[in-house]
Structure formats: C-alpha cells, structure tokens
Image (cartoon, coloured by chain):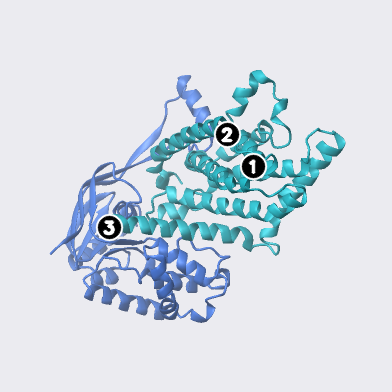
Amino acid sequence: MKNNHISHNLDVIFVLAQKDFKLRYRNSVLGFLWSLLNPLAYMILLTVVFSLLLRVNVPNFAAWVLIGLLIWRFFSLGTSQGLFSIVNNPSLVTKVYLPRYLIVLSNNLANLFSALLEFIIFIPLLTYLGVTPTVFFFFLPVIIALEFLLVFGLSLSLAPLNVKYRDFFQLWEVALQLGFFLSPVAYDSQLIPSRFRFAYSLNPVTGLIESARGIFLFQRLPSTFDLALVSVVVVILLGVGVLVFSSLENRLAEEI
Amino acid sequence: MSRVLEIRDVWKRFRIPHERRTTILDHLASAASVLGGTTRYQYEEFWALKELNLALDQNQSLGIIGPNGSGKSTLLKLVANIMRPDKGEVLTHGMLVPVLELGIGFHRDLTVKENAIVYGVLMGIARSEMRKRIDPILEFSGLARFEDALLKNLSSGMQVRLAFSIAVETDADIFLIDEALAVGDEAFKAKCLERFREFKRQNKSIVLVSHDMDLVNAFCENSLYLKNGETRAYGPSNEITRQYVEASKRSEDASL
C-alpha cells in the first residue's frame, strides 16, 4: 500500500508537471521560442547599456550577462509561478485529496524543465560568443539542482501564504525586483564594498550565478565556500518552507 | 463483512469572520484595531457537523439527504480527507474515489486525450494503466472521434461525460458522489445508473449526496438525514426519505 502511494504520487507529479509545461507553450504560435526571446532581448539590452554605453570592464560581457540572466530567470519565474500554483488550482485542493505539496512540486518541476532546456539551447550561442566548451559544463546540473531546491523551498512558503493573503504576490513581486539588483546579474559583485560582501553573498542567487559563470567562462569549479553557503541557505529555506506549508496545509481547503 | 467507513463522534467547525480579511492590509488593519482596543477579533463559530457517528460495510451504500447548508458536502469532504474534523475521527478502508465535481483539473487548452490522462491519474488510476484504458474510456464516453480535439471545443455536457467515464473506470471500493449525476442528458444518465447497478453487483459501496429521493431509494439501503449539522434520522432509505419529504412540506407550509 505504501509503495502504491509513492508510485501514485509520482504519477500525479508527472501528469501535473507535464500539463503545466504543455500549457506554458501551447497558446502561442512561437511556443517555446518566446521563452528564448526574453533572455535574448535582455542580453542585448544590458550589453548595449553596460558594455557599449557605460563601458563596464567585463570581458565577454554578452555571454557573462546571459548566464546571469538564465539563472535569475529560473529563480524569478520558478518562485512567482510556484506562488500561484495553489491559488490557480482550487479544485485540486477542494474536490480531491492529494498531498498538497505535490501541486507546488509539479509546478516547480515544469519550471526546472524549462530552465534546463533554455540552458541547453543557449549553449551554442555561448560558444558562438567565445565560450569554450569544457568538461566543467557538466557541473551545471549541480548548480541547477541546488537552484531547484531553493525555488521549491521558497514556493512551499509562498504558495500557501498567497492563499491566506491574496495580495501576497504583490509583495513577492517587489522582493523580486529588489532581488534582481541585489544579485550580480548585470554587474560584477566585486563592485560591492568588502564590508557588505558577506551579507551580500547570503543571497543564494549570488552564489549560483557566480558558480555558473565560473564553470562556463573561467573553467573553474565553484568554490567550496560558495557552495556550502548556498547549501546552508537553501536548507534553511526548505526547512522554513516545510514548516509554513505544514502549518497552513490543513486549512487550505477552507480558505481557498 | 468488512467495514469500509467508520465515523466516530465527528465535529467540524467553520469560522466565519465578521469582516472578510483576505489581504495583508486587512489583517494588519484588524490587528491594529484589536491591539488598540477599539474592536475585538470577531468571527462567528459555526458547527457544520456535530457529534456524528456512522458505519458502513462493504457492499452497502449510504444516502445523505437534508436541506441546503445542513453539512452534507462537508461530511463528504471529511470522508475524502479533503478537510480534517475538529474532533473525532474518520476511518476508511480500501480505495476511495471522491466524485465531488466532474472534470477536476480539466484544462480547455489541452486535448480530450491529454485531459483524460491527467484526470484519470488524479482520480487514482496509474498512468501506465490509464494509457491502456484510454481507448475503452473514450469509447464509453462516445467521444473517441474527438480524442485530439481541444477540450474547449466540446460542449459542457460532453465534458461531463468524459469525466464521468473516467471516474467509473477507477478501482474504487467506495465512491463518494455529490450530485454528480444531476448533469448530462437522459440517455447518458441511464448509462450512469446502469454502471452504478454494476458497482452494487461488484460489492462496491456508494456514498451519495442527493436531493433526488428516488435515486437515493434505488441505490442506498440506508440513509442519513442531516439538519443544521446534526443527525436528524438514520435508517432504511424508504423510511428516512419519507420523513425528509414530510418535514420539507411542513416547513414550506409553515413559511406560507
């Protein structure tokens, strides 16, 4: 029976994630291409502004900024869609019994899949921009996996909070906007004065972006310190997520 | 004879806030006024179910009747584990399939076949099994030639037929049905009733919430008559439905 539950839960995760993924690209002619257009447009815009106009001194700025954008994109899309995963599916909560975290998890998995596809599709562009493919590329799944756990941990808190407080998404939108500038997407983290450096690197997205740039641009493995710091923050956020979720889960059916 | 369902001294309470607070601002404003001593945190407690006891054996079926707001649907949700009781316990044995709403998780932009698989898995059928059974299901629903059509191009009656055809394919030991039969045309209704007779022959249990007394009498040996969350009467369906119909007539007369 127990075994049965696990395989059924896996089936539920699979069909819900597949459904989210299909729907994301079904309603438009260009489908998946749209999701490539957004990071491309930002890459060009930021390259023009920072590299050409402001003459920021980062070699291979376009590739450098694209990597930051892709990591940021998974974080921001993953959490903001995870936040709506329950509110947008009330009947999965009120009309049938599923362990509710499956709804959040499957939404996050659909985003993970999109993020992986985006990275894979952009690898030829990165090499065109002068990035040499090396074995270090194979470290990307580790970074993405860590980021996935980060997105899942946050979504576990955000999704039920957004049921209880219907305007919660507005707060998260602002937080994401701030987060974009508190992460080294468009600028080099070396610009941060050293006394703020530690507080700054508590933002887990920082470590993820720098690690990804390391493996793509500088042929170096992420530093143990970076990875350890990100992992600690991720574990804490997962723990908080589990606590928030389990304390709000039982009343979801009444409050949605 | 084995028990499939047991309800022991179950109580369920709802809180109805006097002013509905759904945003963070609402919560802050009311917290401020509570702290400031101008108002108290006000909500009405409302017992949706009180002191309910019930047992159901395999191959028995139960009708639940009563006026609107008497707690019928709440009871089904407690049995389905969608809500938890505040006191007492609900024990179920065997596979339980709630048909509280047909077409949970349906999405208009997915095809008939895609929707069927998602719904089947949500209702508890394994994904591998669902792929095997999809053709007979579409056959039964009479929608086989629309399998690749988008759901939005089907009439609402056809959508209900699709959902129903999947729900009856589950290997449930207990079906929880909330007025699901009230939809669909006469021919399809007859087909549904035939399926239910078959379930009875297969020793499956049905818990049926309905306002259709003939249906309750036809399928359920015993019935529970709820009023204001309390057990008004319990016993053989013929007897109980007669009491309910008479009580309804009296209250109608009284209000005239």
Total number of numbered discs in the rendering: 3
**What SS does tag 1 mark?**
helix
B225 and B164: which one is in front?
Answer: B164
Q: Which shade is chain A?
A: cyan
A235 and B225: which one is in front?
Answer: A235
Label 3: which residue? A1
A159 and A146: which one is in front?
Answer: A146
Query: Between disc 3 and disc 2, whose residue precedes?
Result: 3
Tell if the residue under mark 1 belongs to the same chain as the one under mark 2. yes
**Which quarter of the figure has residue A168?**
top right
What amino acid is found at the position of numbered circle 2 in the picture? Pro
Viewed as shown, does residue A41 lie left or right of B148?
A: right
Label 1: which residue? A215
Q: Residue A194's x, y, as percent?
A: 67, 20
Do the CB atoms of the residues marked 1 and 3 lie less than 8 Å apart? no
What amino acid is found at the position of numbered circle 1 in the picture? Ile
Mark 3 surroundings within 10 Å by alpha-carbon count, few (fewer than 14), some (14 through 19), many (20 or more) = few
Residue with the most extreme right position: A53
On residue A204, the disc is 2
Residue at 22% from the left image edge and 62% from the top image edge: B223
Viewed as shown, does residue A171 lie left or right of B115?
A: right
Labels 1, 2: front one: 1
Tell if the residue under mark 3 belongs to the same chain as the one under mark 2. yes
C-alpha separation, residue under disc 1 versus residue under disc 2: 17 Å
> Which chain is disc 2 placed on?
A
> Which chain is disc 3 placed on?
A
The answer to whether any part of residue B18 appears in the image is: no
Q: Which chain is blue?
A: B
